[in-house]
Image (spheres, grey):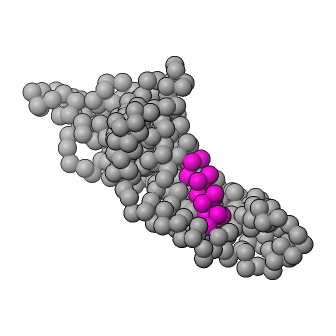
């Protein structure tokens, strides 16, 4: 088990290193002049040249990468060109909202998908199974941004149960939670539809195993067999998909936050791209990449807890 964790940790660090090189390279080969973005078109060439020198834009790209990477490890991502404040400060202000939205979306996705997937497997070939699979197929086909607009029209405009957008802040927890209900549902339902189909397939495969038939023959209730025997043994493919879906949930916040006008990292990224604030875009893309790579690393470690063969060093 120790060897497995060490190997995964080494892969995790190597992946982050490669991602940082790719992100920095892409951001620095894009056309455009940061000095022109900061000073405007009315600035003289001498002023722009002096600013490039002060920002280190004339240094070799390798030196610039090393300087950026070392500073980023210390929490310093530079100063935003368009906002004029440290990028770390912008991230710190908006991270809690995006983090809360992604975690809430993950929880709703997992809870909904496990319930629907196991229920469909228990009703295999019957009307309940077909109904759940039809729902999941519709969920896969509907884009998240269109689902967001449908939810706003129904629950905010017509029924007026929930706010259509905006975020009141964390000072009023109940108002904050109400503002996150529709974005969370819009973010989670599409992913839950995919995960429900995976859960159903994994559960059906386990239900064909001899130990499940033995559990049924000993008189265990169907509920205990499904949730106590089938689900734990079907978790490996489910956890794999959850790890991949977390990437979609994190990147999906970019769209959802702009649809619902939420002041999170996704909206900050959108605004920074529009303002050609490349240093902020670079920091945010790297931060999103860290979220995704970390989530997959956690999934790898979860395998050790789920699969006894890994704990015994056989896989």
Q: Return the residue found at the far right.
A: 218
Compared to residue 168, the image places residue 276 above or below, namely below
Query: Is residue 61 found left or right of 207 in the rendered image?
Result: left
Splitting the image into 4 quarters, where does residue 142 fall? Answer: bottom left
Residue depicted at 40% across the width and 32% down the height: 160
Height in image: 54 above or below 158?
A: above
Can I make out residue 57 in this image?
Answer: no
Quadrant location of the N terminus in the rendered image: bottom right
* Side of 92 relative to 124 (left or right): left
Give the residues drawn in magenta, as a range. Answer: 106-121
Q: Is residue 115 magenta?
A: yes
In magenta segment, residue 195: no
Q: Position of residue 138 (x, y in %)?
A: 43, 63
Q: Left or right: 213 with respect to 8?
A: right
Q: Is residue 172 visible?
A: yes
The residue under the point 73% across, 75% down is: 207
Q: Residue at x 55, y 24 (%)?
A: 173
Residue 111 drawn at (x, y percent): 62, 52
Near-viewer residue (129 or 258): 129
Residue 148: image x %, image y %? 38, 46
Q: Nearer the viewer, residue 259 or 264?
A: 259
Give the residue at x 9% y 27%: 42
Image position of 114 with respect to 58: above or below? below
């Amino acid at each position: 088990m120790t060897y497995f964790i060490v190997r995964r940790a080494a892969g995790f660090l190597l992946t982050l290193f490669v991602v940082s090189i790719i992100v920095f390279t892409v951001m620095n080969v894009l056309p455009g002049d940061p000095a022109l973005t900061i000073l405007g078109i009315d600035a003289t060439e001498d002023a722009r040249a002096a600013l490039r020198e002060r920002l280190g834009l004339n240094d070799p790209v390798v030196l610039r990468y090393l300087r950026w990477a070392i500073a980023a490890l210390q929490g310093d991502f530079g100063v935003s060109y368009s906002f004029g404040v440290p990028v770390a400060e912008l991230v710190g202000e908006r991270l809690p909202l995006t983090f809360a939205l992604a975690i809430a979306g993950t929880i709703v996705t997992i809870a909904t998908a496990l319930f629907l997937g196991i229920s469909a497997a228990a009703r295999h070939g019957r009307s309940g199974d077909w109904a759940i699979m039809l729902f999941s197929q519709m969920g896969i086909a509907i884009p998240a941004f269109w689902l967001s607009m449908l939810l706003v029209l129904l629950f905010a405009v017509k029924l007026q149960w929930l706010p259509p957008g905006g975020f009141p802040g964390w000072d009023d927890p109940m108002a904050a939670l109400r503002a996150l209900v529709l974005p969370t549902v819009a973010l989670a339902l599409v992913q839950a539809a995919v995960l429900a189909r995976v859960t159903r397939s994994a559960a059906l495969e386990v239900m064909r195993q001899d130990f499940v038939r033995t559990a049924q023959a000993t008189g265990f209730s169907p509920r205990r067999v499904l949730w106590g025997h089938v689900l734990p043994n079907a978790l490996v493919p489910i956890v794999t998909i959850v790890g991949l879906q977390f990437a979609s949930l994190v990147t999906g916040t970019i769209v959802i936050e702009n649809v619902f006008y939420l002041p999170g990292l996704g909206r900050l990224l959108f605004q920074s791209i529009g303002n050609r604030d490349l240093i902020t875009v670079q920091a945010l893309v790297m931060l999103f990449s860290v979220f995704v790579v970390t989530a997959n690393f956690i999934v790898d470690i979860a395998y050790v807890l789920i699969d006894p063969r890994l704990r015994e060093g056989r896989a």
